[in-house]
């Protein structure tokens, strides 16, 4: 009898349903659970993937009790062997359900610490793991007082944000007052605290890890090309980039210490850090596979299906990872450089002709109002490429992205063409 895997929710961009696709291709009995399954059926490709699952279930994926009832009902149809969740908004719920039902998943304590940046900071502080100076602030007066003591610029953020949402650079008190107000207004919605942090200079990277029975394998490092301040907009990333051997070992040692301190036992991790002259400084840990196309990029680089390895962990099998990557991959997020109504987006077919291009996706359409981005939600499309190494993949990506341009409606059906960033 085939193993039964339950997948709870997915991301709605990038490689969101790839884990569902891989589970179906592996010949597993697959159930997909979502509060709103229709939100994933945006196109023919997504709909065709979900049509292959044995059970498409509508259930409250944010409720431990409701999700447990759903899993137990599915278990009566076909014994449930594993559960998977790769989304920030549901992973804490799923971790608690998994423990209660004795299913392989990262333990709830580790997931909670990783999902709450304030808790991650406290664990790092206790274990002497390098992090930016930080302070939990309850009121704007305290925030201003600390920022004045530290000196500007500083960063203010929600402890539970994701994708650079609710992360603001403040260069003076006026900006701090404004941004504090924005986060405070949404505090109840996110259940997060407000963190004030020093601004650390240096390039941003992430290291991708996979853990089984407490043993972590680091797959490699992803670089993160960021847009211009004051916003934290990710423009592109590439995997696996090379650091100096001594620095790479230092990074693995620091991030490994964090995994041990938090208690990571199963699953993927995506840990972001800033590389300073003195070594890595932790930005955050995510108790899941990195978003966007990081999953397919890992798969391409190692010539494996990383989602099948995630599935293996869920059903109690150790993941099989080659010793070294054999190629590189890169993704580029397409943004508008101005605000306006889209007339048309040109160059998609041309971009596909560039070397190494695997996929070009345009999400904006004629008539959409688009703006220049302030976080990940401003993208109007993306593309990803491969190459003999990360550097070649990145060069392929940048060149292909240059083929994309946007025509805007100005007035009286007059159009103006502008490039993308």
Image: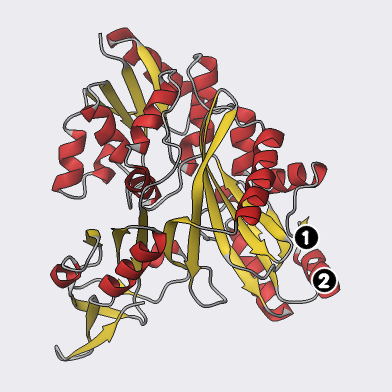
For residue 132, side relative to residue 38 (left or right) = right
Q: Residues within 10 Å of mark 2 (few under 14, many from 20)?
A: some
Q: Position of residue 82 (x, y in %)?
A: 40, 20
For residue 263, side relative to residue 309 (left or right) = right
Res 9 seen here: no
Kindly report the distance in space between the C-alpha atoms of the residues bearing marks 1 and 2: 9 Å
Residue 310 figure quarter: top left
Q: Position of residue 290 (x, y in %)?
A: 46, 47
Q: Is residue 223 above or below residue 417?
A: above
Image quarter of the C terminus: bottom left
The residue labelled by disc 2 is 150
Circles 1 and 2 in contact, beta carbons < 8 Å = yes
Q: Residue at x 35, y 52 (%)?
A: 327
Which mark sits nearer the N-terminus, 1 or 2? 1
Q: Residue at x 34, y 22 (%)?
A: 5
Marker disc for residue 407: none
Marker disc for residue 133: 1
The residue closer to the viewer here, 9 or 389, is: 389
Q: Residue at x 39, y 24 (%)?
A: 312
Res 330 seen here: yes
Residue 79 figure quarter: top left
Q: How many marks?
A: 2
Check disc 2 and report its element: helix, strand or loop: helix
Q: Residue at x 35, y 24 (%)?
A: 6
For residue 269, side relative to residue 334 (left or right) = right
Q: Residues within 10 Å of mark 1 (few under 14, many from 20)?
A: some
Q: Position of residue 420 (x, y in %)?
A: 32, 78
Residue 60 figure quarter: top left
Check disc 1 and report its element: helix, strand or loop: loop
Q: Position of residue 208 (x, y in %)?
A: 51, 45
Image quarter of the N terminus: top left
């Amino acid at each position: 009898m085939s193993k039964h895997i339950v997948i709870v929710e997915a991301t709605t961009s990038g490689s969101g349903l790839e884990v569902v696709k891989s589970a179906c291709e592996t010949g597993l009995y697959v159930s997909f659970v979502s509060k709103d399954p229709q939100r994933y059926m945006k196109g023919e490709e997504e709909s065709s993937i979900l049509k292959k699952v044995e059970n498409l279930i509508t259930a409250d994926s944010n409720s431990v009790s409701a999700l447990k009832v759903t899993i137990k009902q599915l278990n009566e149809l076909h014994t449930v062997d594993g559960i998977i969740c790769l989304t920030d908004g549901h992973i804490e719920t799923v971790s608690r359900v998994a423990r209660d039902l004795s299913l392989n998943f990262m333990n709830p304590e580790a997931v909670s610490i990783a999902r709450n940046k304030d808790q991650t900071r406290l664990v790092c502080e206790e274990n002497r793991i390098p992090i930016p100076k930080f302070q939990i602030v309850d009121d704007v007066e305290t925030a201003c007082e600390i920022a004045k003591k530290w000196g500007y610029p500083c960063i203010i953020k929600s402890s539970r944000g994701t994708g650079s949402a609710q992360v603001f650079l403040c260069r003076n008190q006026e900006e701090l007052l404004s941004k504090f107000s924005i986060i405070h207004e949404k505090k109840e919605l996110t259940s997060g605290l407000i963190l004030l942090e020093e601004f650390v200079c240096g390039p941003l990277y992430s290291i991708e890890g996979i853990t089984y029975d407490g043993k972590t394998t680091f797959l490699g490092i992803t670089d993160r090309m960021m847009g211009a301040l004051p916003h934290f907009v990710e423009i592109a990333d590439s995997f696996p980039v090379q650091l100096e051997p001594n620095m790479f070992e230092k990074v693995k040692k620091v991030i490994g210490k964090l995994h041990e301190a938090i208690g990571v036992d199963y699953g993927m991790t995506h840990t972001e850090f800033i590389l300073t002259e003195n070594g890595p400084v932790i930005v955050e840990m995510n108790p899941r596979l990195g978003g966007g196309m990081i999953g397919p990029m890992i798969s391409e680089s190692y010539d494996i299906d990383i989602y099948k390895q995630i599935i293996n962990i869920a059903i109690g099998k150790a993941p099989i990872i080659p010793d070294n990557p054999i190629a590189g991959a890169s993704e580029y997020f397409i943004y508008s450089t101005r605000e306006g109504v889209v007339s048309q987006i040109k160059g998609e077919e041309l971009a596909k002709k560039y070397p190494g291009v695997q996929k070009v996706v345009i999400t904006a359409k004629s008539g959409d109002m688009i703006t220049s981005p302030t976080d990940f939600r401003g993208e109007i499309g993306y593309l990803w490429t491969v190459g003999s190494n990360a550097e070649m993949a990145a060069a392929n990506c940048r060149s292909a992205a240059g083929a994309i341009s946007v025509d805007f409606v100005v007035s009286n059906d007059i159009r103006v063409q502008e490039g993308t960033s």
